[in-house]
Image (cartoon, helix red, strand yellow):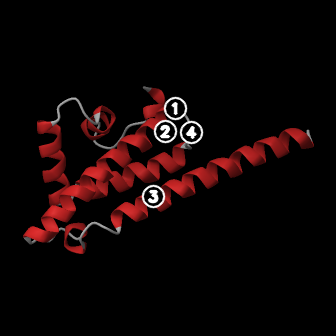
Amino acid sequence: MVALYQVWKNTEQSKTTFEDSLSKEYRDISKNIPYNALIGKKLNDDEKSQAYNEIFNYMDFCNEQIFLRQSGRVRKNTWNNWQEGMHTNFSLPIFASVSAEVFKELPGTFQELRKVIEQKFNADPNKW
């Protein structure tokens, strides 16, 4: 029984470490998004250019997070936190604008993210 508990504990620790590494990846992306974009303010041309690039990277990152939940590699609680963050970010004007443009110009991309958005950020990809 102790051995089984230890295996479970090690598995949980591995998931925590993995999820933490993804949180770091998110911080690396978000720190490059202009502050004005993150607070919903109007952007100058330089900020827009930077925001478009980083928001595209963020969309790719979101799609990866969705895939990881879909394949059962992250816990439901972690997924719910991530999904709440996606909802917050995609509610900001520049995120909404960039994602709408990307979805229009690249119709076959980010299918998982599109599905989460269509489900109003109330999805569990692990059940798809």
**Residue 42 visible somewhere in the drawing:** no
- Which amino acid is tagged 4? Arg
Amino acid marked by disc 2: Leu
Q: Secondary structure at mark 3?
A: helix
Task: Between residue 95 and residue 128, name the one nearer to us.
Answer: 95
Circles 3 and 2: CB atoms closer than 8 Å = no
Amino acid type shown at disc 1: Ser
Q: Nearer the viewer, residue 10 or 1?
A: 10
Label 1's element? loop
Specify whether 76 is left or right of 36: right
Asked if the residue at tag 2 contacts the one at tag 1, i.e. Cβ–Cβ closer than 8 Å, the answer is yes
Q: Residue at x 8, y 68 (%)?
A: 45
Labelled disc at residue 90:
none
Q: Which residue is mark 1?
A: 71
Q: Nearer the viewer, mark 3 or mark 2?
A: 3
Q: Which residue is mark 3?
A: 25
